[in-house]
Amino acid sequence: MAVITTVDDLKRIYKRRVPKMFYDYAESGSWTEQTFRENTTDFDQIRLRQRVAMDMTGRTTKTQMLGEDVAMPVALAPVGLTGMQSADGEIKAARAAEKFGVPFTLSTMSICSIEDVAENTTKPFWFQVYTLKDDDFMQRLMDRARAANCSALVITVDLQMLGQRHKDLKNGLSAPPKLTVRSVADMMTKWSWGLGMLGTKRRFFGNIVGHAKGVTDPSSLSSWTAQAFDQALDWDRIAQLRKMWGGKIIVKGILDVEDARKAVNVGADAIIVSNHGGRQLDGALSSIRMLPDIVDAVGEQIEVHMDSGIRSGQDVLKAMAMGAKGTYVGRAFVYGLGAAGEAGVTKALEVIHKELDTTMGLCGETDVNALSRSNLLIPADFRGRWET
Ligand code: GLV
């Protein structure tokens, strides 16, 4: 591997190695991509308070997320089609996460199935579900996740219909990719990716195909979401899903104080402040801007996690100092996976860990759990002043 010092280095290699269709899938926001962009540029607005002559020895990034020990407060987010970024991608990412000591979350929309990941790892992972109309299928997904020893269910509540991502439509995104003149010409330049794909049989949505009824086009994400997702979702249904699961739940996709309070009321164990990486409601605020209001409202009652926009250890530090108890990376690990498989995911985690650890020291902190807003310089109007 070339000398990798940033997650962006991995992204450059990833772009060269993976078919455009899958690069575009990961690297898109919905509509104008305003929210997608602001998820990262809003992090840049927050500055760090430099402190000196404070003993920085004995630093630790260890903490807990949902009662589980983690080497740093960075879980791998559920990302659809991860097994199209690299052959058996979910297995590779789960193994890298396990060895590093951070949680891995498997997406329902994965290529490797729940069972595939369970057979190839030794520690419990988290499983993400969308809210679907088909109760039998939901129940079976949960039974499978329980049988695989998953220790938490992540319920995505911000995707009852898909935010439009123009590039996916233009590229004709599917898994496996449909063979057109354009896609074949592109794939011929991505030979190591192609060899990997020829070497695995995992090329379809492993949790769905053969398990869900009425899947008319097993390769298309958008057609299945349109048919299966429950647009009538409400908090009673979320409470019902919690009962069906019977274990810990994390509600993913909260971006509003009122919704955060509702998640507390249904007994969620944690929430993820998230705008789905800018892939759903374009025009929504960035997660890092919404985080402080939500922490202030419910941080004493529930574990508040955040995702959307984290690309570095400094971003992790800013989120933790703002009051999050954990963060998630999606794209950052996918860049590593596409660049170099399992070793690339490990590299992404190492880069983030080093940035977090060094930045903590230079801020005069030795314990990730002790970070607070006093480590940050936050622009006075960061939360925004909006008409009510
Ligand atoms: C699925 O959750 C996606 O954002 O594509």
Image (cartoon, rainbow, N blue to C red):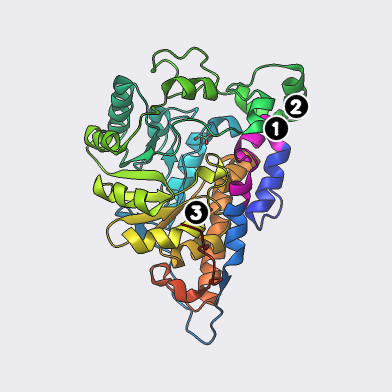
| Foreground pick, 157 / 55 | 157
- N-terminal of the pair, mark 1 or mark 2, is 1
Is label 3 within 8 A of ligand 1 (CB to nearest ligand atom)?
A: no
Mark 3 closeness class: few <14, some 14–19, many ≥20 residues within 10 Å: many
Report if residue 162 lies within the magenta region: no
Q: How far separated are the C-alphas under marks 3 and 1?
A: 27 Å
Q: Secondary structure at mark 3?
A: helix
* Residue 168 percent coordinates (x, y): 63, 29
Q: Residues within 10 Å of mark 2 (few under 14, many from 20)?
A: some
Nearest the eye: 29 or 110: 29
Q: Where is residue 347 drawn, in percent x and y?
A: 58, 51
Q: Secondary structure at mark 1?
A: helix
Please state which amino acid type lies under the numbered disc 3: Ser
- Label 1 is placed on what type of residue? Lys
Residue type, label 2:
Asp
Say which quarter of the image contains residue 187. Answer: top right
* 105 or 309, nearer to the observer: 309
Please report contact status of discs 3 and 1: CB closer than 8 Å, yes or no: no
- The residue that mark 1 highlights is 20
Q: CA distance from mark 3 to mark 2?
A: 34 Å
Q: What is the crowding at mark 1: few (fewer than 14 residues within 10 Å), some, or many (at least 20)?
A: some
What residue is disc 2 on?
186
* Residue linked to disc 3: 287
Task: Between label 3 and label 2, give the one nearer the viewer.
Answer: 3
Going from N to C along the chain, the mark reached first, 3 or 1, is 1
Magenta segment range?
A: 17-37
Asked whether mark 1 and ligand 1 are closer than 8 Å, the reply comes as: no
Is 96 situated left or right of 175 in this image? left
Q: Is residue 19 visible?
A: no
Q: Which residue extends farthest bottom?
A: 53
